[in-house]
Amino acid sequence: MKEIHSIIDTLSQKSDSKIVMLVADGLGGMPMTPDGKTELETAKMPNLDKIVPASQIGLLDPVQPGITPGSGPGHLGIFGYDPLEANIGRGVLSALGVNFDLKHGDLCARINLCTIDGNGIITDRRAGRIATDQNIRIMKKLNENINVPDGVQLFLETEKEHRAGMVLRGKKFYADIADTDPQKTGLAPLDPVASDPAKGEETVEILKDIIAQAKAILADEPQANMMLLRGFAEYSQYPTMQERFKMKSLALATYPMYRGLAKLIGMDVNWNISTMEEQLDELKKQFNNYDFFFIHIKKTDSYGEDGNFEQKVKVIESIDTMIPKILELNPDVLILTCDHSTPAKMKAHSWHRIPSLIYSQWCRPDRISTFNEYTCRGGSLTGLATKHLIPIAMAHAGKLAKFGA
């Protein structure tokens, strides 16, 4: 991995101030019709409206203009890491997200259980978002019946709903392998292909055999009768937020992969919360014990991917009710942002810049009255990369020393 430290790391200093980052995954949207409103414009957000005029807002680039980010690089950016240098395959994040004890050199992939028809064509890439207990049963079935070569260990771990993680251990595996998910229904799963066929030949053959066995074992399943592999990556340790920014950090995320992202960069993780109410309760309980808090809301993204505009709006309105409960703890800085946009109209991540807000007593306010994709265009944060959010928040929180004499 390339050097990802910056001048911010050298200026970071320990302080008692608190930063809360509220991440509404996939928050950014777009109108369903040319004359319509976005999800943010439609949502009623009375609590956010109270603090927007005293805040800095803007539209930020999660990677570079025109680049659609995955959840990994999207989050690494808002955590202050350069997503181009620090990017890692989703497989590692899936494994870490279920608190799997990865070892250096493990090859990881993220599993999507899917549905194929009698001709081997994908009819549902998410297997109807099967219940997590069904996923647990299926992973047990696969773990007990798939055979791997001598010297190789295979671990299949449930993540949530149709998602799971795969870990291969025991050999020097080749990690630069293309996804087997074609990203569309109506197509057959792809074969794993190495970018360098000579170097990746052994790994690819092991993967092909595992996939073929899984297909046969799952043939009698009504929905999850095939698996797709994505985000191949070899695990290695990242520099932590404590090392870089002198911030002891806590992740309050309900979805496994985002816990994995947090663990990757050294955050402590609460593994037992599942609701917004539990996130807020834990924030209050731990407020004196940490410097930085990452609160992640998944459903804004899920409903965006499902094309459910109305439900995405309702989640945004629920997030608004969290604002006063966070502010009553008197954090020095509140950040509201997202890792990428997921417009319900597109049913997918998009390249659009992401609406973001920083609120603190030291803001030079933009004096804009509402928060949405269009008002954010006029804010002082517009045009920045998301990797600059953390340094700006740290400056507001007194966590950066002066540069130079």
Image (cartoon, helix red, strand yellow):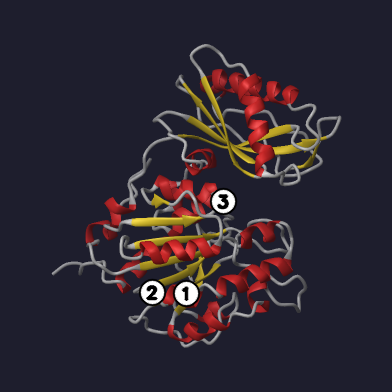
Q: In what quadrant of the picture does the C terminus appear?
A: bottom left
Q: Which residue is mark 3?
A: 70
Q: Neighbour class for label 1 at 10 Å: few (<14), some, many (≥20)?
A: some
Q: Which mark is residue 405?
A: none
Q: Which mark is residue 329?
A: 2
> Spatial distance from mark 3 to mark 1, Cα to Cα?
30 Å
Mark yes or no: residue 391 visible: yes
Q: Which residue is mark 1?
A: 325
In depth, the one of 339 and 200 nearer the eye is 339
In depth, the one of 183 and 50 nearer the eye is 50
> Spatial distance from mark 3 to mark 2, Cα to Cα?
32 Å
> Pointers 1 and 2 in contact (CB under 8 A)?
yes
Q: Amino acid at mark 1?
A: Lys
In depth, the one of 319 and 8 nearer the eye is 319
Residue drawn at (32%, 74%) of the image: 396
Q: Is residue 200 left or right of residue 211?
A: left
Q: Secondary structure at mark 3?
A: loop
Q: Secondary structure at mark 1?
A: helix
Image: 9 above or below 363: above
* Total numbered labels: 3
Q: Is residue 203 left or right of residue 161?
A: left
Residue drawn at (44%, 65%) of the image: 21
